[in-house]
Image (cartoon, rainbow, N blue to C red):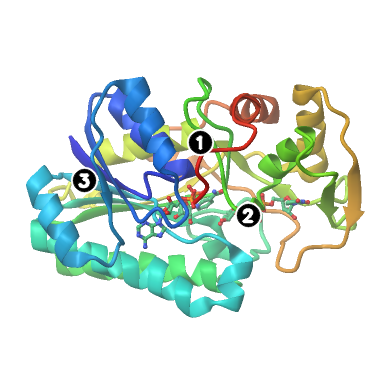
Amino acid sequence: MKVLVTGGAGYIGSHAVQRLLRDGHDVAVLDNLGRGHREAVEALRASSGKEIPLLEADLQDRAVIAARLRELGTEAIMNFAALAYVGESVTDPLRYYENNTAGVVSLLQAMQDAGVKRFVHSSTCATYGEPEVMPIREDTPQSPINPYGWSKLFVERVLADHAAAEPGFAYAALRYFNVAGSDPDAVIGEDHHPETHLIPVLLNTALGKRESATIFGLDYPTPDGTCIRDYIHVSDLIDAHVAVMNELDPDREDRRQMIFNLGTGKGLSVKQIIDAVKEVTGVDFPVEHGDRRPGDPPSLYADPRKIREQLGWSASITDATTMVRDAWKWFQENPSGYASQA
Ligand SMILES: NC(=O)c1ccc[n+]([C@@H]2O[C@H](COP(=O)([O-])OP(=O)(O)OC[C@H]3O[C@@H](n4cnc5c(N)ncnc54)[C@H](O)[C@@H]3O)[C@@H](O)[C@H]2O)c1
Ligand SMILES: O=c1ccn([C@@H]2O[C@H](COP(=O)(O)OP(=O)(O)O[C@H]3O[C@H](CO)[C@@H](O)[C@H](O)[C@H]3O)[C@@H](O)[C@H]2O)c(=O)[nH]1
């Protein structure tokens, strides 16, 4: 298939590009490089020997994107482009609604202009907010607790309404839990600025780039007092995207709208992740005990049954050690991250 990957210069999107190329798809990238890395696309070009056209554009450049979609003959879009800092979304909500919500509306209009019918979208478990009952099912009520989560939930609504009005359109909204790990061959990796995600923060500490790491809260109602999350390896996450994209079919009622959680179903605590990072890196870095981070629910993990029952897909990696080991390889080989920092 001819696939456009938006946000393809970012962490998760670049892994999608890599996998789609390996599967023989014709892949192009759209990214405004605001938070992505040209070097990620260059590394993929070098390792694959493929050209990988990079369209440096914003989701809201409707006319430019529509023209490019026609030119490329694009058949499906995987959309990873978004701003994704919860704290920033609280201080600058309009930017999040403009980029993450209005941006996707504009992208859908460009798709409509160019007649592209298949859309796979990055949603998030942040759309559920703080559910009282675990595990989280797809029909668990969605009630975000920050503008980032709302900006993504609004897109789910836009997609449902658009699909209802346009029978030729098929989409998936995939609600990711905590994405972790990276390409085991370390061609590409995870490089956010600033970095706030637990595993890369710990790896930076193991590398000596930070003096210590901090556990945000040890008084949660969990077995070891630290927060529990559902970590899914980025390779598994992308595997699910490919499975879903292959099934999307505007002509089949049961394949026009697919909404799935993407997690392993297994909860891991912050302390368990720290133990895995210390074991994999062999570095006993200092860990401080800090206060709770506002807005962090004690425990979030998926019920991953729906995608297993409907598509036969489930995550193959459920242990923290493998996720950390793969991420660590890229960190060791690229201690300063990608060469030019976005
Ligand atoms: N990392 C996680 O654990 C996680 C969890 C749930 C959902 N998600 C979602 O997955 C997606 C990818 O996350 P990531 O961690 O790879 O983020 P990332 O910041 O590494 O990648 C996002 C990419 O999108 C690009 N981008 C952003 N807005 C754009 C716009 N308006 N036009 C063009 N390009 C734009 C950025 O330059 C960047 O390259 C996001 O939609 C995020 O909300 C991530
Ligand atoms: O230095 C740190 C960083 C994180 N944590 C804790 O580690 C857990 C995981 O935190 P983090 O890696 O920041 O992920 P989340 O806050 O769970 O959010 C991620 O996962 C969400 C979906 O689950 C996405 O929507 C967000 O974009 C993404 O940042 C949380 O309990 C944090 O309190 C620490 O204790 N210390």
Residue indicated by mark 3? 76
Give the Cα separation between the discs numbered 2 and 3: 31 Å
User: Depth check: 221 or 285 in front?
Assistant: 285
Left or right: 174, with 58 as reference point:
right
The reply to whether residue 312 is in sight is no
Q: Residue at x 90, y 40 (%)?
A: 286
Q: Is residue 115 above or below residue 264?
A: below
At label 3, the amino acid type is Ala
Q: Which label was assigned to residue 194?
A: 2
> Is label 2 in contact with label 3 (beta carbons under 8 Å)?
no
Q: Secondary structure at mark 3?
A: strand
Q: Is residue 136 above or below residue 230?
A: below
Question: Does the residue tagged 3 have its C-beta within 8 Å of any atom of ligand 1?
Answer: no
Residue 203 at x, y = what percent?
Answer: 72, 36
Crowding near pointer 1: few (<14 within 10 Å), some, many (20+)? many
Q: Residue at x 59, y 52 (%)?
A: 193
Residue 230 at x, y = what percent?
Answer: 64, 44
Q: Which label was assigned to residue 234?
A: 1
Question: Does the residue tagged 2 have its C-beta within 8 Å of any atom of ligand 2?
Answer: no
Kindly report which numbered mark, 2 or 1, lies closer to the viewer in this rendering: 2
Q: Residue at x 85, y 45 (%)?
A: 212
Residue 33 at x, y = what percent?
Answer: 40, 53
